[in-house]
Amino acid sequence: LYSCHTQDKEPSHQNQEFTYDSQASTFVSSLSGLCIDVSGTNVQIMTCAGQASQQWRYNATDMSVRHLQTGLCLDAGSSYPPPCSQAPFSTYPYCDTTLAPQDRAADLVSRIPDQEKWALFGN
């Protein structure tokens, strides 16, 4: 996941634009032509092949995107880092303002799951 920049019309920045093909029940990237696909519980962008792992339904009533095969909703994932204002996170080193910034940053990065690190820094 990445911060939204949908108003930026620079061609190389249109990687967040998808069209929904209601015939195939797929979301297709406007930039790459690849489809949103599921492997286990991981969402990825893959070559469109018409397989069940790529079929979705948009529900305009509740604004959800559901995977047809599993019935599960597309989700933005968990919130990292957890906010320092919530217990017990306020006691974590990354929330300790008396520590050096590099120590706080190292602690924070160590708490992000590897898969989410890739998503954060893979762009």
Image: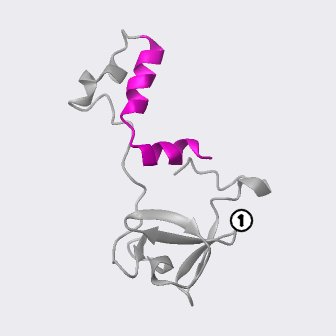
Q: Is residue 93 visible?
A: yes
Mark 1: give few (<14), some (14-19) or many (20+) Cα within 10 Å: some
Colour option used: one colour
Q: Residue furthest bottom?
A: 23
81 displayed left or right of 30: left
Disc 1 residue type (three-letter): Leu
Name the residue rendered at 40%, 29% in the picture. 108
Q: Quadrant of residue 109?
A: top left
Taking the magenta stretch, the answer to whether it contains residue 66 is no
Is residue 75 left or right of 11 when viewed as pictured?
left
x then y, percent, for residue 4: 58, 51
**From this viewpoint, which residue is outermost toward the left?**
88
Magenta span dominant secondary structure: helix
Task: Find residue 34 and report its image quarter.
Answer: bottom right
48 with respect to 82 (left or right): right
State whether residue 68 is above or below residue 86: below
Q: Residue at x 45, y 70 (%)?
A: 38
Q: Position of residue 106 (x, y in %)?
A: 43, 24
Residue in the image at 38% along x and 11% along y: 99
The verdict on residue 120 being magenta is yes
The stretch in magenta equals 100-123
Question: Residue 110's x, y, as percent?
Answer: 39, 31
| Residue holding disc 1 | 31
Q: Looking at the picture, tell me which residue is in the foreground, 5 or 70.
A: 70
